[in-house]
Image (spheres, helix red, strand yellow):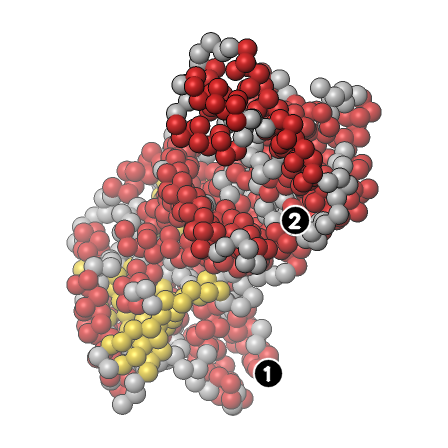
C-alpha cells in the first residue's frame, strides 16, 4: 500500500508516496538484533534502497552479522561481518531480514 | 621491448592503497580532480629498471559498478585503452570481501597483479594463504606486503618488474558462476561479439555480458549495448523461471561471494579463533553511547588547540617576515622613482598576500591534525557518533567536523568536506559553511561590540552573533535539504576501519597536498584582489582639495611647534635621554613615551604648557592629514561606488561609508575594519583603535552597530571562499548562487532587524 511517511533523514519533511511492505509478524530484521548477538542474513527485501550496494559490500543471504553498537541519538547501527565493521542506517537495516535467533 | 607502461592501482577503501602509491611514486605525484566530479585523481611516475611506469591511483571502491561517483570513475578509467596492468591491492586481513572487487577486475582480462597488503596483521589474526593456489585461481602473480614498510615494497617492485617483462604470457583467471549463469553469460556474450563494437574491442564481451546480466547501470546506459538488452531480459526471465533465481541485481553478488568462499576455503586457512582486537577495545569507549560524544568534543577541542595555539608563534614570524620584506623593498626602491608602483607593490601586493599567507601555519597545522584523525581511523567514528544529531538538520555525521572548522576559516573547512561521500550532503554542507562565523569576522565584532554595548553585555553579544550564525546555518541546511536537495538521501554505508598508527610520512604528504592549494590561492586570487582593491582605494588621485592642507599644516607648525627655547628647557630638566632630545629637535613635538616619562615627575607650569602645546600640535597635524585622506578616499573608485550604492543600503541602516567598507570586505572580511578606519580618517586602523570606536558612537546607533555585525556575519566571508567553492564543486554556478543567496539572506535579515528595531525604538538612541 502507498502511504506518506516522514522522511528517513529526520528532517521532518514528508517524503513522496512510498511503497511500504509489511513483512510477516515475528520476522527478525537487522534493526532488531540486540547488541552483542549475531545472526545470519535470510534475505534482503527489494524495498531496500541501492540494494546492489549492500550486496556488493557483502550483505547477502548467509552472511553472519553481529550487532556491535548503536550510535547516540539515533539512527546509526554498527554491525560486524566478514571481518569488518560497517555503520548503516536503521531504516535500511529494517529491510534486511535475519534468520531467527536461537534462544539463549 | 616496451619501455613505457601504464599501471592502474585499484582496491577497496582503507586497503592501504594510498600508502603503496606513496611508497612507489614518492613525491612525483600529480593530484587533480576527475572532470565533472569531485573525485580526486592521482597519478605518478617512477622508473623500474629501465622501464618508465605511469601509476594511476584509482579511487577506493568495493565494486565495479556505478553506485557512487568513485565507482563511476573507476569504471570509466578501466574502460580506457592502454592500461597494461592492474595492480590490485587486497586487504589480506579480510580476504573474502577484498577479493570481491578482484573477481570483477579479473573479468576485464587486463593483466593483473595482486598485492596482499597488511600480511603481518593477517598472520597475527591467524590467516594462512596458499599463494600458488590463489595465483592459479586468479591467473596472476600475488605478492605479500606489509603496509608501507620498505621490505614489502622491494618484493613488490621485483614481482612487478617480472610481471611487466612477461606480460605476453600472462595467465587467465578461472572464474565460473555455475553452469546456469555461465550459460546465460555466454548467450549474451555471443550476441555482443556479433555486434562487433569497435570502441570496446579491448574488453572481453563476457565482462559486459555479466554487467548487463546484473542490470549494472554503468553498462546498461551504454548505447552500444542497447541491441542486446532484449536478450538480457530473456536470459534473466529464463534464470528466474528455470533456476528459481530471483533478484537480478543481487544474484551475481551472491554468486561471486559463493565463488570466493569456495576459493578461500581451498586456499586460506584460519588457525585461530577470532578474538577481540585492541581496535575493538578502543571502540568500546570511543563509540560508546554515553562516552562517545564527550570524547568527540574533547578531541575536537584538542584539534582547535593544536591549530590555533601551537601555530600562533609561527604566524608571528611570518607576519614580521612580510613586514621586513616590505621594508626591504622600500629601502631598495627610492620613493622618487615611480612612487605609485612602489606602494602598490609594498602595501598592496606584499601586504595583501602576506595578510593571507600569515594563516598558512594554521592551515598546515589544521590539516596535520585532520590527517591524524583520518589516517588513524577516528574520523569514521566521529561521523558515527555525530550522525544522530546532524541528521535532524538534514546533514550527516561527517558534516560536523567541517562545520566546526568553519569557526576558524571557511576555506580549509570547505576542503575538509571531501570526506562526505554523499554529493547532496556535501553540497549542502559547503553552502551553509560560510554562515559559521569565521576568524576573519572576529575583528569586526571586536570593533563594534565594545563601541556600542556595555561591558557586562559584551560577551553575551559575541555569543549571540555566533549563535545566530549556527542557527541560520542549520535552518538553511534543513530548508535546502527539503527543497533543492530533497528526496531520499543516498544510502549510508560506512566502513569503520580498524585503528592504525599513522606514519609521519603520510601525515606530512596529506598536509602538504592541501596546504599547497592554499599557497596557490594566495598566489593567484588573493594577489589579484589585493591589486584591484589597492587601485580602487587609491585611484583616481585627488589633486584639488576643499582646503589647502599643506598650508594648514604649515600654519599649525608655526603656531604650535616647539621652539628652540622650549626644547632647551626640556633638555636642561634632565628627564629625557639624549636620543629623545635629538628626536624632538627634528619633529618639534613630543612622543607619547616622552610625555609619559615627563609625567613621572612633578611638572612645573612651564613644562605643562610645553606638553599641552606639543600635544595640540600633534593632534592638529594628525587631524588635518586624516581629513585629507578621507577626502582622497571619497574621490577614489571605492568611495564613488560606495556613494552610488548607498541608497540600496540605506534601508538596512548603512551610510556610504559603511557601504564602501562592506564592498571592500568582499575580498576578505578583515578589510572592513581597515577600510572603515581609512574612511573615518584614523589612518590605518586595527580593531583596538579607540578613536574609531568614538567615531562609530558619534555617527551610528547601537541598532546600526548590530546590523553591521549581522550583515557581515551573513554575507560571503571572502573571495577565496567563492574560489574554493568553485574548485570543490566544479562549477561556476554554485559560487555565484552562494554569493547571491548569502547577499539576499544578509540583506533581508538585516532589513527586517533594522526596520523592526527602528519601529520599536530598540537601540535607536545615539550613545
Q: Is residue B348 left or right of residue B110?
A: right
Query: Mark 2: few, some, or many residues within 10 Å (few <14, many ≥20)?
Result: many
Dot 1: chain letter:
B
Q: Which of the pair A12/B134 is nearer the observer?
A: A12
Residue labelled with disc 2: B537
Tell me the number on the disc at residue A28.
none
Q: Is residue B247 left or right of residue B140?
A: right
Q: Which of the pair B89/B52 is nearer the observer?
A: B52
Dot 2: chain letter:
B
Which SS class for mark 2? helix
Q: Which of the pair B51/B682 is nearer the observer?
A: B682
Q: Is residue B488 left or right of residue B565?
A: right
Can you tell which of label 1 and label 2 is closer to the viewer? 2
Q: Which of the pair B101/B497 is nearer the observer?
A: B497
Tell me if label 1 and label 2 are in contact, CB under 8 Å.
Answer: no
Residue labelled with disc 1: B227
Q: Quadrant of residue B290?
A: top left
Say if B274 sits above or below B281 in the image.
Answer: below
Task: Name the spot of residue B481 as percent of width and height, x first.
Answer: 64, 46
Which quadrant, please, contains the N terminus of chain B? bottom left
Q: Residue furthest front?
A: B565
Among the two numbered marks 1 and 2 on one chain, the one whose residue lies closer to the N terminus: 1
Say if B125 sits above or below B180 in the image.
Answer: above
Q: Residue at x 53, y 22 (%)?
A: B566
Q: Residue at x 28, y 55 (%)?
A: B505
Task: Name the spot of residue B674 as percent of width and height, x first.
Answer: 60, 39
Say if B723 sits above or below B45 in the image.
Answer: above
Which SS class for mark 1? helix
Q: Residue at x 52, y 33 (%)?
A: B587
Amino acid at each position: 500500500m502507498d502511504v506518506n511517511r516522514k522522511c528517513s533523514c529526520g528532517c521532518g519533511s514528508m517524503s513522496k508516496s512510498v511503497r511500504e511492505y509489511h513483512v510477516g509478524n515475528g520476522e527478525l530484521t537487522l534493526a532488531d538484533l540486540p547488541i552483542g548477538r549475531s545472526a545470519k542474513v535470510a534475505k534482503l527485501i527489494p524495498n531496500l534502497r541501492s540494494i546492489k550496494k549492500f550486496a556488493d559490500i557483502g550483505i547477502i543471504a548467509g552472511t553472519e552479522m553481529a550487532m556491535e553498537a548503536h550510535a547516540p541519538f539515533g539512527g546509526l547501527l554498527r554491525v560486524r561481518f566478514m571481518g569488518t565493521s560497517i555503520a548503516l542506517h536503521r531504516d535500511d537495516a529494517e529491510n534486511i531480514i535475519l534468520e531467527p535467533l536461537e534462544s539463549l | 621491448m616496451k619501455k613505457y607502461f601504464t599501471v592502474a592501482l585499484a582496491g577497496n577503501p582503507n586497503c592501504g592503497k594510498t600508502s603503496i602509491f606513496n611508497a612507489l611514486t614518492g613525491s612525483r605525484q600529480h593530484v587533480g580532480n576527475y572532470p565533472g566530479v569531485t573525485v580526486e585523481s592521482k597519478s605518478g611516475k617512477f622508473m623500474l629498471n629501465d622501464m618508465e611506469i605511469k601509476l594511476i591511483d584509482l579511487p577506493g571502491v568495493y565494486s565495479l559498478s556505478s553506485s557512487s561517483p568513485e565507482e563511476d570513475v573507476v569504471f570509466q578509467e578501466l574502460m580506457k585503452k592502454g592500461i597494461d596492468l592492474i595492480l590490485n591491492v587486497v586487504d589480506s586481513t579480510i580476504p573474502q570481501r577484498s577479493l570481491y572487487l578482484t573477481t570483477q577486475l579479473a573479468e576485464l582480462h587486463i593483466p593483473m597483479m595482486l598485492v596482499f597488503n597488511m600480511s603481518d596483521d593477517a598472520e597475527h589474526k591467524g590467516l594462512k594463504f596458499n599463494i600458488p593456489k590463489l595465483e592459479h585461481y586468479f591467473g596472476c602473480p600475488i605478492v605479500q606486503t606489509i603496509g608501507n614498510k620498505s621490505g614489502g615494497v622491494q618484493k613488490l617492485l621485483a614481482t612487478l618488474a617480472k610481471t611487466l617483462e612477461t606480460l605476453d604470457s600472462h595467465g587467465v583467471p578461472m572464474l565460473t558462476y555455475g553452469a546456469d549463469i555461465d550459460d546465460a553469460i555466454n548467450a549474451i556474450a555471443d550476441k555482443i561479439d556479433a555486434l562487433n563494437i569497435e570502441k570496446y574491442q579491448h574488453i572481453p564481451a563476457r565482462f559486459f555480458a555479466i554487467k548487463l546480466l546484473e542490470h549494472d547501470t554503468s553498462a546498461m546506459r551504454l548505447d552500444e549495448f542497447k541491441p542486446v538488452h532484449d536478450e538480457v531480459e530473456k536470459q534473466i526471465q529464463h534464470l528466474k523461471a528455470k533456476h528459481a533465481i530471483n533478484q537480478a541485481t543481487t544474484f551475481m553478488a551472491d554468486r561471486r561471494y559463493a565463488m570466493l568462499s569456495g576459493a578461500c576455503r581451498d586456499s586460506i586457512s584460519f588457525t585461530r579463533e577470532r578474538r577481540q582486537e585492541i581496535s575493538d577495545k578502543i571502540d568500546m569507549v570511543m563509540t560508546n553511547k554515553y562516552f562517545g560524544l564527550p570524547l568527540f568534543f574533547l578531541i575536537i577541542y584538542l584539534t582547535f588547540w593544536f591549530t590555533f595555539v601551537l601555530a600562533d608563534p609561527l604566524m608571528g614570524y611570518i607576519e614580521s617576515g612580510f613586514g621586513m620584506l616590505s621594508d626591504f623593498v622600500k629601502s631598495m626602491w627610492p620613493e622618487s622613482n615611480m612612487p605609485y608602483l612602489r606602494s602598490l607593490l609594498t602595501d598592496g601586493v606584499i601586504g595583501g598576500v602576506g595578510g593571507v599567507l600569515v594563516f598558512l601555519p594554521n592551515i598546515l597545522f589544521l590539516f596535520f591534525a585532520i590527517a591524524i584523525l583520518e589516517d588513524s581511523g577516528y574520523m569514521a567514528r566521529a561521523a558515527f557518533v555525530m550522525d544522530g544529531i546532524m541528521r535532524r538538520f538534514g546533514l550527516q555525521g561527517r558534516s560536523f567536523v567541517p562545520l566546526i572548522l568553519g569557526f576558524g576559516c571557511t576555506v580549509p573547512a570547505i576542503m575538509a568536506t571531501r570526506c562526505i561521500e554523499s554529493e547532496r550532503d556535501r553540497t549542502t554542507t559547503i553552502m551553509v559553511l560560510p554562515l559559521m562565523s569565521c576568524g576573519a569576522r572576529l575583528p569586526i565584532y571586536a570593533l563594534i561590540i565594545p563601541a556600542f554595548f556595555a561591558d557586562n553585555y559584551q560577551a553575551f553579544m559575541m555569543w549571540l552573533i555566533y549563535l545566530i550564525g549556527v542557527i541560520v546555518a542549520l535552518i538553511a541546511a534543513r530548508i535546502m535539504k527539503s527543497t533543492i536537495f530533497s528526496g531520499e538521501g543516498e544510502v549510508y554505508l560506512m566502513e569503520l576501519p580498524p585503528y592504525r598508527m599513522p606514519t609521519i610520512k603520510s601525515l606530512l604528504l596529506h598536509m602538504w597536498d592541501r596546504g599547497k592549494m592554499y599557497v596557490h590561492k594566495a598566489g593567484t586570487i588573493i594577489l589579484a584582489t589585493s591589486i584591484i582593491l589597492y587601485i580602487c582605494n587609491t585611484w583616481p588621485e585627488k589633486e584639488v582639495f576643499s582646503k589647502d592642507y599643506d598650508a594648514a599644516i604649515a600654519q599649525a607648525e608655526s603656531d604650535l611647534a616647539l621652539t628652540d627655547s622650549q626644547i632647551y628647557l626640556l633638555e636642561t630638566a634632565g628627564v629625557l635621554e639624549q636620543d629623545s632630545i635629538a628626536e624632538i629637535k627634528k619633529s618639534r613635538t613630543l612622543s607619547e613615551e616622552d610625555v609619559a616619562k615627563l609625567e613621572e615627575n612633578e611638572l612645573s607650569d612651564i613644562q605643562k604648557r610645553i606638553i599641552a602645546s606639543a600635544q595640540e600640535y600633534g593632534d592638529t597635524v594628525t587631524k588635518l592629514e586624516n581629513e585629507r585622506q578621507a577626502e582622497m578616499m571619497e574621490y577614489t573608485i571605492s568611495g564613488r561606488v560606495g556613494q552610488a550604492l548607498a541608497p540600496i543600503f540605506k534601508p538596512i541602516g548603512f551610510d556610504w561609508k559603511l557601504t564602501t567598507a562592506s564592498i571592500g570586505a568582499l575580498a576578505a572580511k578583515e578589510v572592513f575594519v581597515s577600510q572603515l578606519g581609512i574612511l573615518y580618517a584614523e589612518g590605518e586602523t586595527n580593531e583596538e583603535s579607540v578613536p574609531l570606536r568614538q567615531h562609530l558612537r558619534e555617527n551610528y546607533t547601537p541598532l546600526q552597530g548590530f546590523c553591521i555585525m549581522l550583515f557581515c556575519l551573513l554575507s560571503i566571508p571572502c573571495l577565496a571562499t567563492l574560489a574554493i567553492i568553485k574548485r570543490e564543486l566544479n562549477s561556476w554556478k554554485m559560487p555565484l548562487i552562494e554569493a547571491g543567496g548569502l547577499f539576499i539572506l544578509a540583506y533581508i535579515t538585516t532589513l527586517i532587524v533594522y526596520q523592526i528595531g527602528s519601529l520599536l525604538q530598540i537601540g535607536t538612541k545615539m550613545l
